[in-house]
Amino acid sequence: MMYRVEGIVIRGTDYGEGNKIVTLFTPTHGKQGVVVRGAKKPKSRFASLAQPFTYGDFSFFKSGGLGTLSSGEIIESFRELREDLTLAAYAAYAAELCDRAVGEEDAGSYLFHQLKACLEALAQGKDAQIVIRAFEMKIVQAAGYAPLLDACANCGNPEGPFRLSAAAGGVLCLRCSGRDPDAVPLESGAWKLLRLFAALDLRRLGNTDVKASTKRRLAQAMRLWMDHHLGVKLKSRHFLDQWERLSGELPEADGERKSADSIEPTERTKE
């Protein structure tokens, strides 16, 4: 049967002498594995279609198992995401999250458009750390592990300050925080941003101005949450963590517990 789909290349592996197998993340047919014949040959007309992060229109024949690409057209190459090491690290992480942390039943239209918006925001130069934290929230929501953020997960108290507890399923107030010694403290700004990420459609993400210390706390909170609930080991995540630590964007250890109650981010997110 012949299929024609829009899709984003989220993974590629060499196959045989000059071919590649790519995984397409589509809005209509979930994740599709497609053989791109001749993709490794410099003069191949399909070589560009097999590049990571490429958003295109793909036609392929499939009778069972993998499909075979018959034609295609690039809609957006996202070339800048491959040419800049920092952007490539964030984009590769977003793509691998879709590949490894999203089940076939969850790979639908909404998440496809969130991934596309994530790549567009990175390519446009928006704050990569904020973009990727918001996208991580979309992933955990799609997987069914959205944190309870509006009130204490234990007693229902809506008043902060809060700590994020992966074991409790959301935030804990000061009175209940002793139930989880591993909970991550959230100053007011970080808590508000997590709630914003939970409600936000990435297609509406504007520019942001968030303090570095708040971004570190957000990264710490989301890493704790995803490690506990998703439990997937990602090569791109390991590289990205090292990259952010080298640039001073992440704490040296997951157990960092410095108080940041006075940190208040300035948000300029478009409605």
Image (cartoon, rainbow, N blue to C red):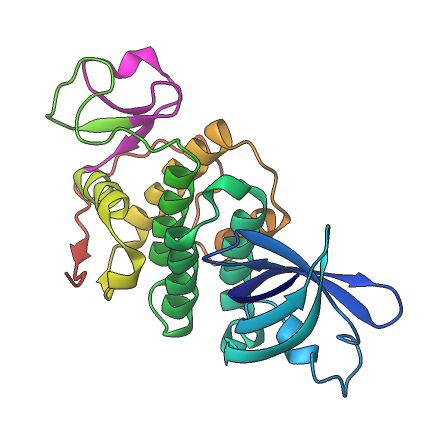
Residue occupying the point 52% across, 51% down: 30
Horizontal and vertical percent position of residue 191: 22, 38
Query: Compared with residue 84, is residue 162 higher up or lower down, i.e. above or below?
Result: above
Q: Which residues are magenta?
A: 164-187
Q: Residue furthest right?
A: 17
Horizontal and vertical percent position of residue 150: 17, 31
Instruction: Look at the image and tell me in which quarter the C terminus lies.
Output: bottom left
Instruction: Look at the image and tell me in which quarter the N terminus lies.
Output: bottom right
Residue 9 in the magenta stretch? The answer is no
Total numbered circles: 0
Q: Nearer the viewer, residue 239 or 35?
A: 35
Residue 182 in the magenta stretch? The answer is yes
Residue occupying the point 48% across, 48% down: 107
Query: Compared with residue 232, is residue 171 higher up or lower down, i.e. above or below?
Result: above
Q: Nearer the viewer, residue 229 or 28?
A: 28
In which quadrant of the rendered view does residue 47 lie? Answer: bottom right
Residue occupying the point 40% across, 61% down: 118
Horizontal and vertical percent position of residue 142: 40, 40
